[in-house]
Image (cartoon, helix red, strand yellow):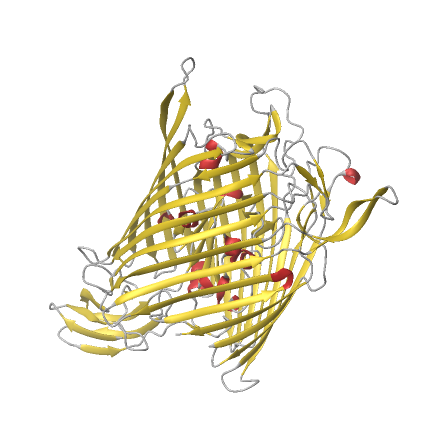
């Protein structure tokens, strides 16, 4: 960094200069601050800045930017004098396996912000066969419950709130924009550089109506040209392939592509299943293989555009396609065996992305994203047979999953747009304004009964957020205050009585939320933080209109709401080549109008969503990390939560009898779980520019009841047992990570694994992965 200090008035001077990276490139948006004053500036796109009218005196000048080491230099401003200082901002340095060598990583800085947030550098997992879900399942406060193997249905929980209360993003864009085929359990870990998990309180910039939190996958936007390609194979005929890359032409045209392919037979052993023995004339327990659970998904997303132009810092247009083919093996538990039911879906999207920093004036930044998505999937259930675990079947009088045969088509075209303005008044004060529009049309019909949906519905969501951030006491204190407005337009055609014609009924409702997040550094190594939000989660299209086969629509639903509170402390210590990090937090959720699926009164095979419950959650969690150089890393975390039914009277009871389950723990939900990870590696052990690394991790989940505690004796109640699942992996890298090969053994103790009652997950499994990375 080059700084030129000169006098601009008799008793004042100006600090002007440019900030450069270690490679000599100009750096924009670097914060230049003078400790102990309200003076400062941000660098422009070309790295230049100006701090005007600085009173004569001695100062410490600080240059800081997320992802780079903080630089300080003492300087004395003298009227009429010019002083030249030279500095270089070094990029945060990480080893090949994600161990911090110098400075604070972007993930660490985010964890030390005012928000309750986990941030994961995925470099440590880049050579594993993990998907994003399995990586997140090892983090504090997060529980991912899968019903089976690859591609199975899953429930994602953050601090006790799950399902649609949690939102998912890629670079701040909702994954729904990519289509329903785009889910976290099929996204390879290679496609993300960092994963951010916000708990209960969300920044305005995400523009989301998330009640429980959000997951944001951050892809690599900084490397000019790179290619990351991988392929893995293993047990149950499982295959994964992924590629992501970017190339910049001499004309300045930039092209990006991301793609993946997943396939598995999922034919793992189901242990101790009950089968009828014709000879013995009784049921016996046998180990059998799953036989109708193949899964295939694939995605490609491409963008082309320009960067660093006078009219745009980034302008890209893109298109993508994703698809999923899934055989359905079981129902709500493994006693319901399906042998022919299928789900197939695909989605196509077009996107536009635009960003301009210092728009019209210094410090005003604009980013815009818009997309249109055609999302379709089909449920096929046309075989009137009952299947058993040995693959045999007997004729029946109804379809496998429902009372009638079906080939149901669900089509949900989506229009999405977001505009985000941020304005930095000075290093101590900043503003953020975000507007998001999300419109979905719902069409579903059973082609065995009709040729189209004669009664489609549409919802349009509007979200506006305004935030104000202040940085005080030489950056020791940061406060963020925000307000959020939610509006929803509902259009649902309804049939008129009498002549059977249709009329479009519509309505608009709005809600207002608000919150704050603060962080205070008591010492340079010790800080505390707290956050609060009055949060809303608007109704989803499937909840309002059903899915066409086993869920009935309910347009009378109200949005969920919750008061979310987080408080915690963190400490970072470094001594020599040893680095420690610890964080502990408490959280509270008081949620109302929970949207649950309940059995429909006239048909036990069909459900519909209703506002049925209030839930109160108290929880604590903690995490410890230790690094020794780039040789050893370990993380241990634990989460405890008490989620109670806070509904005193049943809906419609008018304050009558108190519910038997009032203040009971919410059933079928883990309440105590933890993770331990350790990695041991050495550079140049098997040759120059090589690395050999051994990884181990264990996941523990304490047992929990399937049903309410108030009903039945403890000895007779069903429960999900304790789980201790351990995984091992060995990675060998050559040419500084250009070539990588890994071998893994998951669940190497071959424990019977459950996330849900009587839904077995895979046992011991082996995988090999090959990865090529060049930049």
Kindly give the residue lying farthest to the bottom in the view shown. Answer: 687
Residue at 61% over, 19% down: 656
366 to the left or right of 762: left
Kindly give the residue lying farthest to the right in the view shown. Answer: 280
Residue 83 visible in the displayed image: yes
Q: Nearer the viewer, residue 480 or 458?
A: 458
Residue at 19% over, 59% down: 311
The location of residue 639, given as percent across then percent down, is 60, 52
Residue at 48% over, 43% down: 377
The vertical placement of 396 against 9, above or below, is above
Q: How many marks?
A: 0
Quadrant where the C terminus sits is: bottom left
Q: Nearer the viewer, residue 327 or 675?
A: 327
The location of residue 100, given as percent across then percent down, is 48, 72
Residue 78 visible in the displayed image: no
591 to the left or right of 178: right
337 to the left or right of 617: right
Quadrant where the N terminus sits is: bottom left
């Amino acid at each position: 960094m080059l700084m030129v200090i000169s006098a601009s008035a008799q008793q004042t001077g100006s600090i002007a200069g440019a900030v450069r990276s270690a490679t000599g490139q100009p750096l924009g948006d670097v914060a230049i601050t003078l400790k102990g004053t309200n003076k400062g500036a941000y660098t422009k796109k070309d790295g230049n800045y100006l701090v005007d009218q600085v009173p004569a005196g001695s100062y410490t000048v600080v240059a800081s930017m997320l992802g780079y080491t903080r630089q300080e230099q003492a300087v004395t401003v003298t009227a009429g004098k010019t002083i030249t200082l030279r500095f270089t901002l070094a990029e945060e340095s990480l080893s090949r396996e994600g161990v911090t060598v110098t400075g604070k990583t972007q993930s660490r800085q985010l964890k030390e912000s005012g928000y309750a947030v986990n941030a994961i550098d995925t470099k440590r997992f880049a050579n594993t066969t993990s998907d994003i879900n399995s990586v997140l399942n090892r983090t504090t406060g997060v529980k991912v419950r899968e019903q089976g193997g690859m591609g199975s249905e899953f429930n994602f929980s953050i601090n006790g709130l799950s399902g649609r209360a949690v939102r998912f993003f890629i670079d701040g864009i909702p994954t729904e924009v990519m289509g329903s085929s785009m889910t976290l359990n099929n996204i390879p870990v290679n496609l993300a550089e960092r994963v951010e998990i916000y708990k209960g309180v969300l920044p305005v910039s995400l523009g989301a109506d998330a009640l429980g939190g959000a997951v944001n996958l951050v892809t690599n936007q900084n490397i000019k040209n790179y290619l990351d390609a991988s392929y893995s194979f293993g047990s149950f005929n499982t295959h994964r392939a992924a590629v992501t890359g970017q190339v910049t032409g001499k004309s300045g045209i930039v092209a990006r592509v991301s793609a993946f392919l997943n396939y598995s037979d999922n034919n793992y052993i189901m242990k101790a299943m009950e089968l009828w023995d014709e000879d013995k004339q009784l049921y016996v327990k046998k180990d059998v293989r799953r036989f109708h659970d193949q899964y295939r998904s694939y995605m490609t997303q491409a963008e082309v555009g320009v960067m660093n132009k006078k009219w745009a810092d980034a302008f890209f247009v893109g298109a993508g396609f994703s698809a999923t083919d899934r055989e359905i093996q079981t129902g709500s538990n493994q006693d319901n065996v399906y042998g022919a039911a299928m789900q197939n879906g695909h989605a196509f999207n077009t996107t536009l992305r635009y960003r301009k920093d210092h728009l019209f004036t210094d410090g005003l930044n604009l980013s815009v994203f818009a997309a249109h998505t055609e999302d379709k999937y089909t449920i096929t259930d046309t075989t009137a047979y009952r299947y058993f675990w040995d693959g045999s079947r007997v004729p029946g009088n109804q379809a496998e999953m429902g009372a009638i045969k079906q080939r149901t088509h669900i089509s949900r075209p989506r229009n999405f747009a977001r505009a985000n303005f941020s304005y930095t008044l000075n290093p101590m004060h900043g503003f953020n304004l975000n507007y998001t529009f999300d419109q979905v049309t719902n069409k579903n019909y059973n082609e065995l009964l009709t040729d189209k949906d004669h009664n489609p519905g549409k919802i349009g969501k509007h979200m506006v957020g305004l935030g104000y951030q202040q940085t005080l006491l030489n950056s020791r204190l940061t406060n963020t205050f925000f307000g959020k407005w939610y509006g929803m337009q509902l259009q649902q055609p309804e049939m008129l009585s009498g002549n059977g014609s249709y009329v479009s009924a519509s309505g608009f409702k709005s809600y207002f939320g608000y919150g704050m997040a603060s962080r205070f550094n008591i010492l340079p190594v010790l800080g505390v933080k707290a956050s609060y939000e009055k949060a809303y989660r608007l109704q989803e299209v499937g909840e309002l209109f059903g899915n066409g086969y086993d869920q009935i629509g309910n347009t009378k639903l109200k949005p969920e709401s919750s008061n979310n509170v987080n408080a915690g402390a963190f400490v970072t210590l470094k001594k020599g080549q040893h680095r420690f990090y610890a964080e502990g937090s408490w959280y509270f959720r008081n949620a109302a109008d929970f949207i649950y699926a309940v059995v429909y009164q006239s048909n036990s095979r069909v459900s519909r969503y209703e506002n049925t419950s209030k839930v109160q959650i108290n929880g604590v969690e903690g995490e410890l990390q230790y690094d020794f150089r780039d040789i050893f890393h370990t993380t241990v975390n634990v989460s405890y939560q008490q989620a109670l039914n806070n509904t005193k009277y049943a809906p419609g009871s008018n304050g009558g009898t108190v519910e038997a389950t009032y203040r009971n723990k919410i059933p079928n939900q883990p309440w105590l779980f933890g993770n331990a990870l350790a990695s041991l590696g050495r550079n140049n052990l098997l040759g120059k520019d090589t690395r050999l690394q051994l990884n181990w991790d264990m996941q523990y989940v304490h047992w929990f009841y399937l049903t309410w505690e108030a009903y039945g004796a403890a000895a007779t109640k069903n429960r999900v047992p304790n789980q201790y699942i351990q995984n091992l992996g060995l990675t060998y890298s050559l040419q500084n990570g250009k070539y990588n090969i890994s071998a893994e053994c998951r669940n190497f103790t071959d424990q019977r694994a459950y996330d849900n009652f009587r839904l077995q997950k895979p046992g011991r499994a082996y995988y090999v992965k090959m990865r090529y990375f060049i930049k």
